[in-house]
Image: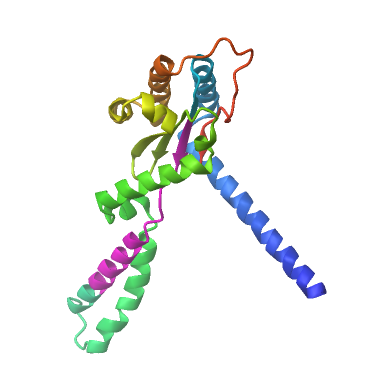
Amino acid sequence: MVKEKNKEKTINLIFKVEKKMKKDIKKSIVSKIVSSEELYQISELIAESERRTDSELVPMIVDMSDLYPAAHFRAAIITSFLFSLALYFSPLSIINPIYFLWIQVPGLLVGYFLAHLPFIKKWLTFEAELECEVKQRALEAFFEHSLHSTQNHNGVLIFISLLERKIKIITDIGVKEKIKQEVWDQIVHDFTDEVKKTTLVTALKKTIEASTHVLENYFPVDHTQTKKRNELKNELIVE
């Protein structure tokens, strides 16, 4: 009994530490991308959007949409080959063929861990993989954060993935019925152009404003209601 209780306490402690680490990582990501003042400005833009429209707008930024394990294995194979190649052209006069096998082991390990570097991970991942994973992660986020459960099915997710440098706008069925996908594609295109000229946060704020303008035309506020529902939090989600 005592051992089981101690084991349970240890497991709970591990979960708490892991939760705190994840929270600290999120804070560090936020601090690198957006200041506290900009976070406030984004929250105000979301609140303004919901004052002007009968919709729920949620912006979200993630560090990456997937771990991309294939990139790690590709890096491991390439590096192990380079290690063998380096040994072949080395000035050593006596080289046993078995050395070429052994040298690949550290090469595999070095390559695998090198792929943790963002630019290497992205370089060793095909564009089609990046596109697929970002879209998949955006759809997962849409349901994880309950944008599908709004009363009028009018949720809109603005999803930005940093590693891939991609943006997706995911809308609920109520929005899809009224607004064509081409409208959102244009907003995505404008974001891509804007982020090249300014900063990600500035581009995001303009994207929120553009989305609000579109939603205002199709989902105006019902002034007969005494108080508008606020079904989701008015804040930038960072994961």
The colour mode here is rainbow
186 over 160 or under it: above or below: above
User: Which residues are drawn in magenta?
Assistant: 58-83
For image coordinates 51% across by 14% down, the residue present is 221
| Position in image of residue 189 (x %, y %) | 28, 29
125 or 199, nearer to the observer: 125
For image coordinates 49% across by 23% down, the residue present is 55
For image coordinates 37% across by 24% down, the residue present is 178
User: Is residue 77 rendered magenta in the image?
Assistant: yes
| Position in image of residue 202 (x %, y %) | 40, 25
Q: How many marks?
A: 0
In the picture, the quarter occupied by the N terminus is bottom right
User: Is residue 54 rendered magenta in the image?
Assistant: no
Q: Is there any visible trace of residue 126 in the rendered image?
A: yes
235 over 65 or under it: above or below: above
| Position in image of residue 21 (x %, y %) | 59, 51
For image coordinates 57% across by 49% down, the residue present is 22
Residue found at the far top of this picture = 223
| Position in image of residue 137 (x %, y %) | 42, 46
Q: Could you tell whether 202 is left or right of 239 in the image? A: left
| Snapshot quadrant of residue 88 | bottom left
